[in-house]
Image (cartoon, rainbow, N blue to C red):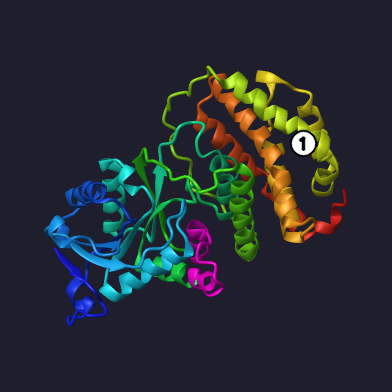
Amino acid sequence: MATTNPMTDPTPALEQHAGSLLVVLPELPADRLRGLLTQLTTSLPAEHLLIAVPGEPAAEAFPGIRFVAFQAVLPSWTLTASEFMNAQQLAQRNGARGILLLGAEADSLTPMGVHSLLTAVDSGTADLVVPRYDLQPRAGLLNSSILYPLNRALFANRVRYPLSIDLGMSLRMGDRLSAVAQRFVSANQGNATIWAVSEASVAGLTISEADVGTRQIPQPADPDLNSILPQVTGSLFSDIEAKAAFWQRARVSAPARRLSPAALSSTTDAAAEVASLLQGFRLAYTNLQEIWGIVLPPNTMLGLKRLSLVDGPAFRMPENLWARIVFDFLIAYRLRTLNRGHLLGALIPLYLGWVASHVNAIAAGEIPERHVESHAAAFEAEKPYLLARWRWPDRFNP
């Protein structure tokens, strides 16, 4: 193993590692690191790889592996601004030809998943490689209900997980993300979220997805939905606001992927789960009508009134209603109609209503991905509504 320290090694790192593919790993115990390195070197010869790990691994434990060390950042459940900056600086310093950035718990990727990501980045055919995970039907629902549909409708791409914990990047993609990250780091916001997919779309860079199968998705330190939804949705809304000049131009997303016949989730606890979700939705309908009425037009409020009277398996959130709700909250966020924290908090019970509808749909036999795709298509269809409200917000006064 060769471990280099760019501050003391007399040989320029650029000469030592030029042409290598930089793989940036999270901090892992030695046994788990060994397993992940085995998967990486099975997919690509070790001499073609340069492994970046926090700290200094024991040299004798990993013969044949070339390492560079970097200062670890606090572990996060998403990739952060600091991590993008670190990765690009390491790539430039070592003359790497591309970057694979693997997030927390990366060793839970299957060998097929590691191979798929590594070979996609190594091929150099895309500037941004985003994994497509195989999650349980009731996992990643914030992504399925808001992040993916908004990304598809506004940035005209069908990347299923736009807030991924793993990413592959070309050097020019890394340059762009590092420049964005620098602004956050300079403002002492190193843990800020960077929306890589929308950055690539705006820059006209190529994006591809890599099927990676299952993965253990790291959880936030505070897994409370009351914290997660405002944090993630607020970050995405801010990014959309900053890129308004781009997404207001007409675009058509790529053709849909063929849906695999995914296994249906167990329905044994669906009734109890839906009952709990609808309890939160109805309680909010009683207590938040005044706030919702500031954000949502009368037709939407009427739709919510009708939904509040539906119970159990019959509860379904209409696709166009959900799309317009999210769009209206995006508009209110932009206009600061309410305190942004209060605004995003008021979105939570509406999200619970969408989740109840999703659970009911798959319990009734609908393929989970088909249900998600139909909602995402509704966001595309309702984009003219968003454009009209964005450009002429004074036309609507609830």
Between 254 and 75, the one lying in front of the other is 75
Determine the residue positioned at 19% across, 77% down: 15
Instruction: Identify the residue at image location x=54%, y=69%.
Output: 184
Q: Which residue is mark 1?
A: 284
Measured from the top left, where is residue 358 in percent x and y? 59, 30
Q: Is residue 56 above or below residue 299?
A: below
Q: How many marks?
A: 1
Looking at the image, residue 216 sits to the left or right of residue 338; the answer is: left
What residue appears at the point 58 percent right and 52 percent down from the top-left corner?
232
Quarter that holds the N terminus: bottom left
Looking at the picture, which amino acid does disc 1 mark?
Answer: Ala
Q: Would you say 284 lies left or right of 94 here?
A: right
Rendered image quadrant of residue 313: top right
The image shows residue 65 at horizontal and vertical percentages of: 16, 60
Q: Residues within 10 Å of mark 1 (few under 14, many from 20)?
A: some
Residue 228 visible (yes or no): yes
Q: Is residue 367 left or right of residue 302?
A: left
Which span is picked out in magenta? Answer: 180-203
Q: Residue furthest top?
A: 268
In reply to whether residue 201 is colored magenta, the answer given is: yes
Q: Secondary structure at mark 1?
A: helix
For the stretch drawn in magenta, the main secondary structure is helix
The x and y percentages for residue 350 are: 70, 38
Name the residue: 39% across, 48% down.
131
In the picture, measured across the screen, residue 146 lies left or right of residue 342, that is left
Residue 386 shows up from this direction: no
